[in-house]
Image: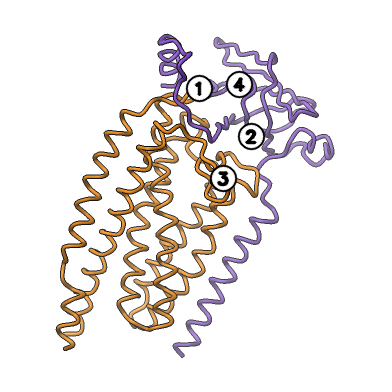
Amino acid sequence: MKPKYVVGLLLVVGALAYLIFGGLGQNLVYFITPSEYFQQVDRYQNRPVRLGGLVKPGTLDYNPQTLELRFVVTDGVKEIPIRSSGTTPPALFGENRGVVVEGRFEGETFVSQNLLVKHSETYQAPKEGWTPEQVRKLIEETQ
Amino acid sequence: MQLARSNQINRLDGLTLGLLGLGGVGAVVGFILAMGSPPDQSQGFVARIFHMHVPTAWMAYLASFGALGYSVAYLVRRKAHHDRVAAAVVEVGLIFMALALITGMLWARPTWGVYWDWEPRLTTTAILFAIYVGYVVVRGAIEDPELRAKAAAGVAILGSINVPISYMSVKWWRSLHQTQSIDLTTGKINVDAAILIPMLVNLAAFTLLFIGLVRLRAIIAAREAAREEA
Protein backbone atom coordinates (compact mmCIF):
# COMPACT_ATOMS: atom_id res chain seq x y z
CA MET A 1 0.00 0.00 0.00
CA LYS A 2 2.81 2.38 0.88
CA PRO A 3 4.57 2.33 -2.51
CA LYS A 4 1.20 2.72 -4.25
CA TYR A 5 0.52 5.81 -2.20
CA VAL A 6 3.88 7.25 -3.15
CA VAL A 7 3.40 6.51 -6.83
CA GLY A 8 -0.07 8.02 -6.72
CA LEU A 9 1.14 11.14 -5.02
CA LEU A 10 4.02 11.51 -7.47
CA LEU A 11 1.61 11.07 -10.38
CA VAL A 12 -0.79 13.68 -9.05
CA VAL A 13 1.92 16.18 -8.30
CA GLY A 14 3.63 15.43 -11.60
CA ALA A 15 0.41 16.00 -13.52
CA LEU A 16 -0.21 19.19 -11.59
CA ALA A 17 3.28 20.43 -12.33
CA TYR A 18 2.91 19.52 -15.98
CA LEU A 19 -0.39 21.37 -16.21
CA ILE A 20 0.88 24.46 -14.52
CA PHE A 21 4.23 24.60 -16.26
CA GLY A 22 3.06 23.31 -19.64
CA GLY A 23 0.10 25.67 -19.55
CA LEU A 24 2.30 28.58 -18.64
CA GLY A 25 4.68 27.90 -21.49
CA GLN A 26 2.03 27.66 -24.18
CA ASN A 27 -0.53 30.23 -23.17
CA LEU A 28 1.48 32.78 -21.38
CA VAL A 29 1.41 35.92 -23.40
CA TYR A 30 1.53 38.57 -20.73
CA PHE A 31 0.82 41.49 -23.05
CA ILE A 32 0.19 42.08 -26.74
CA THR A 33 2.02 44.66 -28.83
CA PRO A 34 0.28 47.30 -30.99
CA SER A 35 1.32 45.36 -34.13
CA GLU A 36 -0.28 42.19 -32.80
CA TYR A 37 -3.45 44.09 -32.04
CA PHE A 38 -3.77 45.32 -35.62
CA GLN A 39 -3.28 41.78 -36.92
CA GLN A 40 -6.35 40.56 -35.03
CA VAL A 41 -8.42 43.63 -34.22
CA ASP A 42 -11.69 41.71 -33.82
CA ARG A 43 -10.23 39.25 -31.36
CA TYR A 44 -9.32 41.95 -28.84
CA GLN A 45 -12.54 43.98 -28.89
CA ASN A 46 -14.67 44.22 -25.76
CA ARG A 47 -12.53 42.08 -23.55
CA PRO A 48 -9.78 42.79 -21.03
CA VAL A 49 -6.44 43.15 -22.76
CA ARG A 50 -2.92 43.93 -21.64
CA LEU A 51 -1.09 46.10 -24.11
CA GLY A 52 2.65 46.72 -23.93
CA GLY A 53 4.99 49.17 -25.61
CA LEU A 54 6.85 52.43 -25.28
CA VAL A 55 5.34 55.83 -24.53
CA LYS A 56 5.86 57.79 -27.76
CA PRO A 57 7.73 61.07 -27.11
CA GLY A 58 5.65 64.19 -27.57
CA THR A 59 2.31 62.46 -27.16
CA LEU A 60 2.05 62.69 -23.39
CA ASP A 61 -0.82 64.86 -22.19
CA TYR A 62 -1.67 64.84 -18.50
CA ASN A 63 -4.20 67.09 -16.82
CA PRO A 64 -3.53 67.13 -13.06
CA GLN A 65 -6.93 68.78 -12.40
CA THR A 66 -9.08 66.08 -13.98
CA LEU A 67 -6.41 63.35 -13.65
CA GLU A 68 -6.97 62.57 -17.30
CA LEU A 69 -3.95 61.10 -18.99
CA ARG A 70 -3.54 60.58 -22.72
CA PHE A 71 -0.56 59.17 -24.53
CA VAL A 72 0.38 56.97 -27.45
CA VAL A 73 1.93 53.54 -27.05
CA THR A 74 4.17 52.34 -29.85
CA ASP A 75 6.19 49.26 -30.65
CA GLY A 76 8.11 51.10 -33.33
CA VAL A 77 5.76 49.90 -36.07
CA LYS A 78 2.19 50.59 -34.98
CA GLU A 79 0.73 53.08 -32.52
CA ILE A 80 -2.31 53.04 -30.26
CA PRO A 81 -3.76 56.03 -28.38
CA ILE A 82 -4.32 55.39 -24.68
CA ARG A 83 -6.74 57.13 -22.36
CA SER A 84 -6.51 56.75 -18.63
CA SER A 85 -8.33 58.65 -15.93
CA GLY A 86 -8.79 58.85 -12.20
CA THR A 87 -5.29 57.99 -11.06
CA THR A 88 -1.95 59.70 -10.82
CA PRO A 89 0.56 57.92 -13.04
CA PRO A 90 3.44 56.16 -11.21
CA ALA A 91 6.53 58.28 -10.55
CA LEU A 92 8.60 56.53 -13.19
CA PHE A 93 6.04 57.12 -15.93
CA GLY A 94 7.28 59.28 -18.78
CA GLU A 95 8.22 59.51 -22.43
CA ASN A 96 10.08 56.55 -23.91
CA ARG A 97 9.21 54.44 -20.87
CA GLY A 98 8.16 50.84 -21.29
CA VAL A 99 4.59 50.48 -20.09
CA VAL A 100 1.96 47.77 -19.76
CA VAL A 101 -1.63 49.02 -19.76
CA GLU A 102 -4.52 46.87 -18.61
CA GLY A 103 -7.95 47.76 -19.97
CA ARG A 104 -10.17 47.54 -23.04
CA PHE A 105 -10.36 48.88 -26.53
CA GLU A 106 -13.14 51.35 -27.10
CA GLY A 107 -13.08 51.86 -30.83
CA GLU A 108 -9.70 53.19 -31.83
CA THR A 109 -8.70 54.18 -28.31
CA PHE A 110 -7.49 51.91 -25.55
CA VAL A 111 -9.03 52.79 -22.20
CA SER A 112 -6.62 51.93 -19.42
CA GLN A 113 -7.81 50.68 -16.04
CA ASN A 114 -4.34 50.09 -14.75
CA LEU A 115 -1.08 51.64 -15.87
CA LEU A 116 2.11 49.72 -15.09
CA VAL A 117 5.56 51.11 -15.73
CA LYS A 118 8.52 48.88 -16.48
CA HIS A 119 11.98 49.82 -15.33
CA SER A 120 15.35 48.70 -16.59
CA GLU A 121 17.59 46.10 -14.98
CA THR A 122 20.42 48.63 -14.85
CA TYR A 123 21.26 50.35 -11.58
CA GLN A 124 23.62 53.28 -11.83
CA ALA A 125 24.68 55.97 -9.42
CA PRO A 126 24.33 59.56 -10.67
CA LYS A 127 27.46 60.39 -12.69
CA GLU A 128 29.95 63.18 -12.13
CA GLY A 129 28.25 65.50 -14.56
CA TRP A 130 25.18 65.65 -12.36
CA THR A 131 24.66 68.82 -10.37
CA PRO A 132 23.57 68.52 -6.74
CA GLU A 133 20.23 70.04 -7.80
CA GLN A 134 19.70 67.24 -10.31
CA VAL A 135 20.45 64.62 -7.68
CA ARG A 136 18.10 66.28 -5.21
CA LYS A 137 15.40 66.46 -7.85
CA LEU A 138 15.84 62.76 -8.59
CA ILE A 139 15.50 61.90 -4.93
CA GLU A 140 12.47 64.11 -4.38
CA GLU A 141 10.70 62.91 -7.50
CA THR A 142 10.89 59.27 -6.64
CA GLN A 143 9.87 59.42 -3.02
CA MET B 1 27.73 3.46 19.64
CA GLN B 2 24.23 4.42 18.55
CA LEU B 3 24.06 6.98 21.33
CA ALA B 4 27.42 8.49 20.46
CA ARG B 5 26.46 8.95 16.84
CA SER B 6 23.10 10.52 17.57
CA ASN B 7 24.77 12.86 20.04
CA GLN B 8 26.99 14.11 17.28
CA ILE B 9 24.01 15.08 15.14
CA ASN B 10 22.15 16.51 18.13
CA ARG B 11 24.84 18.74 19.49
CA LEU B 12 24.66 22.45 18.88
CA ASP B 13 28.17 22.76 17.52
CA GLY B 14 30.54 25.68 17.21
CA LEU B 15 30.25 25.78 13.43
CA THR B 16 26.50 26.44 13.55
CA LEU B 17 26.88 29.17 16.15
CA GLY B 18 29.80 30.64 14.20
CA LEU B 19 27.80 30.72 10.95
CA LEU B 20 24.85 32.39 12.67
CA GLY B 21 27.08 34.92 14.44
CA LEU B 22 29.11 35.78 11.37
CA GLY B 23 25.95 35.95 9.23
CA GLY B 24 24.28 38.24 11.75
CA VAL B 25 27.27 40.58 11.86
CA GLY B 26 27.51 40.46 8.06
CA ALA B 27 23.84 41.37 7.70
CA VAL B 28 24.32 44.41 9.95
CA VAL B 29 27.41 45.47 7.96
CA GLY B 30 25.53 44.87 4.72
CA PHE B 31 22.61 46.98 5.94
CA ILE B 32 24.91 49.87 6.86
CA LEU B 33 26.71 49.63 3.49
CA ALA B 34 23.36 49.47 1.65
CA MET B 35 22.14 52.58 3.46
CA GLY B 36 25.29 54.37 2.30
CA SER B 37 25.01 53.31 -1.33
CA PRO B 38 24.16 55.94 -3.96
CA PRO B 39 20.63 56.34 -5.35
CA ASP B 40 19.82 54.90 -8.75
CA GLN B 41 19.78 57.29 -11.70
CA SER B 42 16.16 56.71 -12.57
CA GLN B 43 14.59 55.28 -9.40
CA GLY B 44 16.40 57.20 -6.68
CA PHE B 45 16.58 55.66 -3.21
CA VAL B 46 13.70 53.28 -3.86
CA ALA B 47 16.14 51.06 -5.72
CA ARG B 48 17.88 50.29 -2.41
CA ILE B 49 15.34 47.50 -1.86
CA PHE B 50 17.59 45.77 -4.42
CA HIS B 51 20.04 45.07 -1.57
CA MET B 52 17.42 43.00 0.21
CA HIS B 53 15.37 41.69 -2.69
CA VAL B 54 18.07 40.10 -4.82
CA PRO B 55 19.91 38.21 -2.03
CA THR B 56 16.66 36.85 -0.54
CA ALA B 57 15.45 35.76 -3.98
CA TRP B 58 18.75 33.98 -4.60
CA MET B 59 18.47 32.29 -1.20
CA ALA B 60 15.02 31.08 -2.23
CA TYR B 61 16.48 29.49 -5.35
CA LEU B 62 19.41 28.10 -3.35
CA ALA B 63 16.95 26.55 -0.90
CA SER B 64 15.18 24.84 -3.75
CA PHE B 65 18.40 23.27 -5.02
CA GLY B 66 19.43 22.37 -1.47
CA ALA B 67 16.13 20.61 -0.88
CA LEU B 68 16.54 18.83 -4.22
CA GLY B 69 20.04 17.64 -3.31
CA TYR B 70 19.14 16.35 0.15
CA SER B 71 15.90 14.77 -1.12
CA VAL B 72 17.79 12.84 -3.80
CA ALA B 73 20.41 11.90 -1.20
CA TYR B 74 17.63 10.58 1.06
CA LEU B 75 16.04 8.52 -1.71
CA VAL B 76 19.42 7.01 -2.60
CA ARG B 77 20.86 6.41 0.87
CA ARG B 78 17.71 6.32 3.04
CA LYS B 79 19.31 8.17 5.95
CA ALA B 80 16.86 10.04 8.19
CA HIS B 81 19.46 12.77 8.56
CA HIS B 82 19.16 13.75 4.89
CA ASP B 83 15.39 13.91 5.18
CA ARG B 84 15.63 16.19 8.21
CA VAL B 85 18.09 18.53 6.48
CA ALA B 86 15.87 18.68 3.37
CA ALA B 87 12.93 19.69 5.57
CA ALA B 88 15.06 22.28 7.36
CA VAL B 89 16.23 23.73 4.03
CA VAL B 90 12.62 24.10 2.87
CA GLU B 91 11.46 25.73 6.10
CA VAL B 92 14.31 28.25 6.14
CA GLY B 93 13.93 28.71 2.39
CA LEU B 94 10.27 29.61 2.86
CA ILE B 95 11.30 32.51 5.12
CA PHE B 96 13.63 33.86 2.43
CA MET B 97 11.05 33.25 -0.29
CA ALA B 98 8.49 35.21 1.71
CA LEU B 99 11.03 38.01 2.21
CA ALA B 100 11.80 38.06 -1.53
CA LEU B 101 8.08 38.29 -2.33
CA ILE B 102 7.40 40.99 0.28
CA THR B 103 10.41 43.14 -0.66
CA GLY B 104 9.48 42.69 -4.32
CA MET B 105 5.95 43.90 -3.67
CA LEU B 106 7.16 46.89 -1.66
CA TRP B 107 9.49 47.74 -4.54
CA ALA B 108 6.84 47.20 -7.21
CA ARG B 109 4.29 49.66 -5.82
CA PRO B 110 6.38 52.85 -6.23
CA THR B 111 8.06 51.76 -9.48
CA TRP B 112 5.62 49.63 -11.51
CA GLY B 113 2.57 51.17 -9.89
CA VAL B 114 1.11 47.99 -8.37
CA TYR B 115 2.02 45.63 -5.55
CA TRP B 116 1.26 42.55 -7.56
CA ASP B 117 0.49 41.55 -11.11
CA TRP B 118 0.09 38.10 -12.64
CA GLU B 119 3.11 38.38 -14.87
CA PRO B 120 5.45 35.44 -15.55
CA ARG B 121 8.18 36.03 -12.93
CA LEU B 122 5.73 36.81 -10.16
CA THR B 123 3.40 33.96 -11.09
CA THR B 124 6.18 31.35 -11.23
CA THR B 125 7.54 32.61 -7.91
CA ALA B 126 4.09 32.36 -6.34
CA ILE B 127 3.83 28.78 -7.63
CA LEU B 128 7.27 28.03 -6.17
CA PHE B 129 6.17 29.40 -2.80
CA ALA B 130 2.94 27.37 -2.92
CA ILE B 131 4.86 24.17 -3.70
CA TYR B 132 7.07 24.54 -0.63
CA VAL B 133 4.09 25.39 1.55
CA GLY B 134 2.66 22.14 0.13
CA TYR B 135 5.88 20.37 1.12
CA VAL B 136 5.42 21.41 4.74
CA VAL B 137 1.74 20.42 4.61
CA VAL B 138 2.58 16.98 3.18
CA ARG B 139 5.08 16.42 5.99
CA GLY B 140 2.49 17.36 8.55
CA ALA B 141 -0.17 15.13 7.02
CA ILE B 142 1.80 11.88 6.92
CA GLU B 143 2.56 10.10 10.21
CA ASP B 144 4.79 7.27 9.03
CA PRO B 145 8.34 8.70 9.00
CA GLU B 146 9.54 6.67 6.02
CA LEU B 147 6.52 7.43 3.86
CA ARG B 148 6.62 11.07 4.94
CA ALA B 149 10.26 11.33 3.91
CA LYS B 150 9.63 9.72 0.52
CA ALA B 151 6.56 11.81 -0.28
CA ALA B 152 8.30 15.01 0.82
CA ALA B 153 11.32 14.13 -1.31
CA GLY B 154 9.03 13.73 -4.31
CA VAL B 155 7.51 17.17 -3.74
CA ALA B 156 10.94 18.76 -3.32
CA ILE B 157 12.31 17.15 -6.50
CA LEU B 158 9.32 18.16 -8.62
CA GLY B 159 9.22 21.62 -7.03
CA SER B 160 12.80 22.36 -8.04
CA ILE B 161 11.81 22.10 -11.73
CA ASN B 162 10.20 25.50 -11.25
CA VAL B 163 13.46 27.23 -10.30
CA PRO B 164 15.02 27.43 -13.79
CA ILE B 165 11.57 28.28 -15.19
CA SER B 166 11.18 31.12 -12.71
CA TYR B 167 14.72 32.34 -13.25
CA MET B 168 14.42 32.34 -17.05
CA SER B 169 10.80 33.56 -17.13
CA VAL B 170 11.89 37.18 -17.65
CA LYS B 171 13.78 36.09 -20.79
CA TRP B 172 11.44 33.45 -22.16
CA TRP B 173 8.24 35.47 -21.92
CA ARG B 174 7.16 39.06 -22.02
CA SER B 175 7.08 40.31 -18.49
CA LEU B 176 6.73 43.31 -16.26
CA HIS B 177 9.70 42.27 -14.18
CA GLN B 178 12.97 43.45 -15.68
CA THR B 179 15.56 40.92 -16.83
CA GLN B 180 18.41 39.89 -14.55
CA SER B 181 20.71 42.71 -13.42
CA ILE B 182 23.35 40.14 -12.64
CA ASP B 183 22.81 37.61 -15.37
CA LEU B 184 24.18 34.21 -14.36
CA THR B 185 23.66 32.81 -17.87
CA THR B 186 25.72 35.44 -19.69
CA GLY B 187 27.82 36.86 -16.85
CA LYS B 188 26.71 40.40 -17.61
CA ILE B 189 26.39 42.80 -14.68
CA ASN B 190 24.36 45.98 -15.16
CA VAL B 191 24.95 47.39 -11.72
CA ASP B 192 27.42 50.05 -10.62
CA ALA B 193 30.12 48.78 -8.26
CA ALA B 194 28.97 51.18 -5.51
CA ILE B 195 25.52 49.57 -5.61
CA LEU B 196 26.73 46.04 -6.34
CA ILE B 197 29.19 45.63 -3.46
CA PRO B 198 26.71 46.16 -0.56
CA MET B 199 24.40 43.68 -2.28
CA LEU B 200 27.22 41.10 -2.44
CA VAL B 201 27.99 41.65 1.25
CA ASN B 202 24.33 41.00 2.02
CA LEU B 203 24.38 37.96 -0.25
CA ALA B 204 27.35 36.50 1.64
CA ALA B 205 25.78 37.30 5.02
CA PHE B 206 22.42 35.79 4.06
CA THR B 207 24.16 32.67 2.75
CA LEU B 208 25.92 32.19 6.11
CA LEU B 209 22.67 32.84 7.98
CA PHE B 210 20.85 30.42 5.69
CA ILE B 211 23.33 27.59 6.29
CA GLY B 212 23.45 28.36 10.03
CA LEU B 213 19.66 28.35 10.35
CA VAL B 214 19.37 25.11 8.38
CA ARG B 215 21.94 23.42 10.65
CA LEU B 216 20.12 24.72 13.72
CA ARG B 217 16.74 23.49 12.43
CA ALA B 218 18.21 20.08 11.54
CA ILE B 219 19.70 19.76 15.05
CA ILE B 220 16.28 20.53 16.58
CA ALA B 221 14.65 17.99 14.24
CA ALA B 222 17.25 15.36 15.21
CA ARG B 223 16.52 15.95 18.90
CA GLU B 224 12.81 15.63 18.27
CA ALA B 225 13.37 12.36 16.43
CA ALA B 226 15.61 11.06 19.22
CA ARG B 227 12.96 11.88 21.81
CA GLU B 228 10.23 10.15 19.80
CA GLU B 229 12.35 7.00 19.58
CA ALA B 230 13.14 6.96 23.29
Give the foreground label among 3 and 4. 3
- Quick one: label 1 or label 2, which is nearer the N terminus? 1
Where does residue B230 sit, x and y in percent of width and height? 16, 85
Badge 2: how crowded within 10 Å, few (<14), some, or many (20+)? some
Residue in the image at 63% along x and 29% along y: A98
Spatial separation of the CA atoms under disc 2 and disc 4: 13 Å
- Quick one: label 2 or label 4, which is nearer the N terminus? 4
Residue B192's disc is none
Q: Chain of mark 3?
A: B
Residue in the image at 37% along x and 43% along y: B200
Q: Which residue is mark 3?
A: B118
Spatial separation of the CA atoms under disc 4 and disc 1: 16 Å
- Disc 4 marks which amino acid? Ser
Q: Chain of mark 1?
A: A
Q: Quadrant of residue B202?
A: top left
Local secondary structure at mark 4: strand
- Disc 3 marks which amino acid? Trp
Q: Which residue is mark 2?
A: A102
Instruction: Tell me the shade of chain B.
Output: orange
Spatial separation of the CA atoms under disc 3 and disc 2: 12 Å
Quadrant where the image shows the C terminus of chain A: top left
Residue A85's disc is 4
Residue A91's disc is 1
